[in-house]
């Protein structure tokens, strides 16, 4: 007998062009028949953990340059199911590569179930003894690979260099700082509360950290923490923090632009670094996407999992429960509520 379930999923009511509010979202329910055509290549999965990422806000806007520049940032139509990164379990399969009860990781949906068409970006998951949530965060594409590729491939660090990380208690920043310390760099991070600053110094091993909300003059603040200048800036926020970092950078400094979260919610905010500094200091500023660096995946997984097992890297996770908690989890990203990787557990493993 073919089963049918009520699939609850979170979507947007309308395009979001400023800071997101919980009222911008709604929980919808649609019937889903748990059946696929044999040999179709399609599978239906039960979603277990889904990623909550700031870049999704750009997809929710009525207009964003990101809409036409990346397959991962295609615009979301109101009421449409939202595709995200996550971990799931196969319920039914019309694909010879997947069997019932296989664990998978890749692009699923902000809902309880996902129908993944043939050719979807999904692969079998070997948990390697780690919690499944780690494969959404520290060992996942949108967090772990982003941190690894951005730091090692874009920043090209050298031992002993001075590294500044913004949004350092967030999903990506917290990992970049730990990679940099293990590599032998001097690392300073900034965050938005004294508790987060303490976490960076006491638990994650940053050499120093500061609360950017308490600083009136970011250029002077960075001069104080980097009297010999900044070699590498891992930029998660954009705007005035990028300007201050560039003003304090050394010759041949590198800036990896991972995200510009302070600009996502405010169209009026723009980074305007001193271009003379960039020319005469020969500074490289490069944006990047994790998807450009899939060739690094096996090295990234191998090195990072070894560091987690030996306790040299700490996985910071902030987990909420239930599909209905997705709106508050997402809105919280833009209010500084999360510490580490924000994840929603949709169902128990």
Image: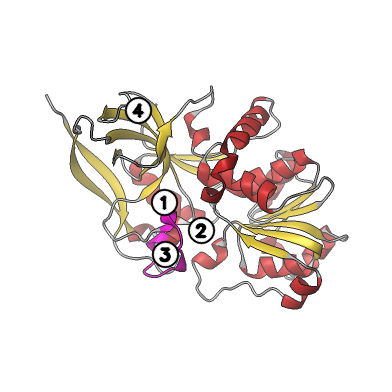
* Residue 36 located within the stretch drawn in magenta: no
In magenta, the rendered stretch is 59-73
Residue at image location 81% in from the left, 73% down from the top: 280
First-in-chain label (4 vs 3):
3
Q: Which residue is tagged 3?
A: 68
In depth, the one of 282 and 146 nearer the eye is 282
Q: Which residue is mark 4?
A: 97
Whole-angstrom CA distance, mark 3 to mark 2, is 24 Å
First in sequence, mark 3 or 2: give its number.
3
Foreground disc of the pair 3, 1: 3
Majority secondary structure of the magenta segment? helix
Find residue 129 and report its horizontal and vertical position in percent.
53, 22
Residue 346 visible in the shown view: yes
Q: Position of residue 276 (x, y in %)?
A: 76, 77
Tell me the distance, in whole angstroms, between the alpha carbons under discs 2 and 4: 39 Å
Q: Which residue is mark 2?
A: 334
Query: Which residue is the extreme one toward the left?
Result: 1
Q: Earlier in the sequence, mark 3 or mark 1?
A: 3
| Quadrant in the rendering for residue 249 | bottom right
Query: Nearest the camera: 81 or 96?
Result: 96
Give the side of residue 30 with respect to residue 256, left or right.
left
Question: In which quarter of the view is residue 182 placed?
Answer: top right
SS for callout 3: helix
Along the polypeptide, which appears first: circle 2 or circle 4? 4
Residue ID for mark 1: 328
Q: Secondary structure at mark 2?
A: loop
SS at mark 1 in the image: helix
Mark pair 3, 1: CA separation: 28 Å
Q: Are marks 1 and 4 in contact (CB under 8 Å)?
A: no
């Amino acid at each position: 007998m073919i089963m049918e379930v009520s699939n609850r999923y979170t979507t947007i009511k309308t395009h979001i062009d400023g800071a997101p509010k919980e009222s911008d979202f709604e929980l919808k329910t649609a019937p889903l028949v748990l059946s696929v055509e044999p040999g179709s290549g399609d599978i239906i999965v039960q979603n277990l953990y889904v990623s909550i990422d700031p870049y999704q806000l750009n997809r929710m806007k009525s207009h964003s340059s990101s809409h036409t520049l990346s397959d991962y940032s295609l615009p979301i139509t109101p009421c449409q199911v939202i595709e995200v990164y996550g971990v799931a379990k196969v319920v039914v399969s019309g694909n010879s590569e997947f069997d019932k009860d296989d664990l998978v990781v890749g692009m699923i949906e902000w809902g309880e179930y996902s129908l993944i068409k043939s050719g979807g970006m999904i692969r079998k998951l070997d948990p390697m003894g780690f919690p499944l949530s780690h494969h959404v965060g520290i060992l996942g594409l949108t967090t772990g690979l982003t941190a690894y590729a951005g730091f090692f491939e874009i920043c090209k660090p050298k031992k002993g260099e001075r590294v500044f990380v913004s949004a350092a208690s967030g999903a990506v920043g917290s990992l970049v700082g730990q990679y940099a310390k293990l590599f032998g760099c001097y690392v300073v991070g900034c965050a938005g509360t004294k508790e987060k600053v303490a976490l960076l110094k006491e638990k994650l091993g940053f050499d120093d950290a500061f609360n950017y909300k308490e600083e009136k003059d970011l250029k002077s603040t960075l001069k104080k923490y980097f009297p010999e200048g900044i070699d590498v800036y891992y930029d998660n926020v954009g705007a005035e923090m990028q300007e201050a970092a560039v003003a304090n950078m050394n010759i041949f400094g590198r800036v990896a632009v991972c995200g510009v979260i302070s600009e996502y919610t405010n169209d009026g905010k723009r980074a305007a670094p001193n271009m003379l500094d960039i020319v005469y200091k020969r500074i490289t500023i490069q944006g990047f996407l994790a998807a450009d660096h899939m060739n690094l995946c096996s090295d990234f997984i191998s090195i990072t999992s070894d560091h987690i097992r030996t306790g040299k890297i700490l996985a910071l996770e902030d987990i909420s429960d239930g599909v209905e908690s997705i709106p508050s989890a997402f809105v919280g990203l833009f209010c500084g509520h999360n510490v580490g990787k924000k994840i929603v557990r949709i169902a128990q493993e």
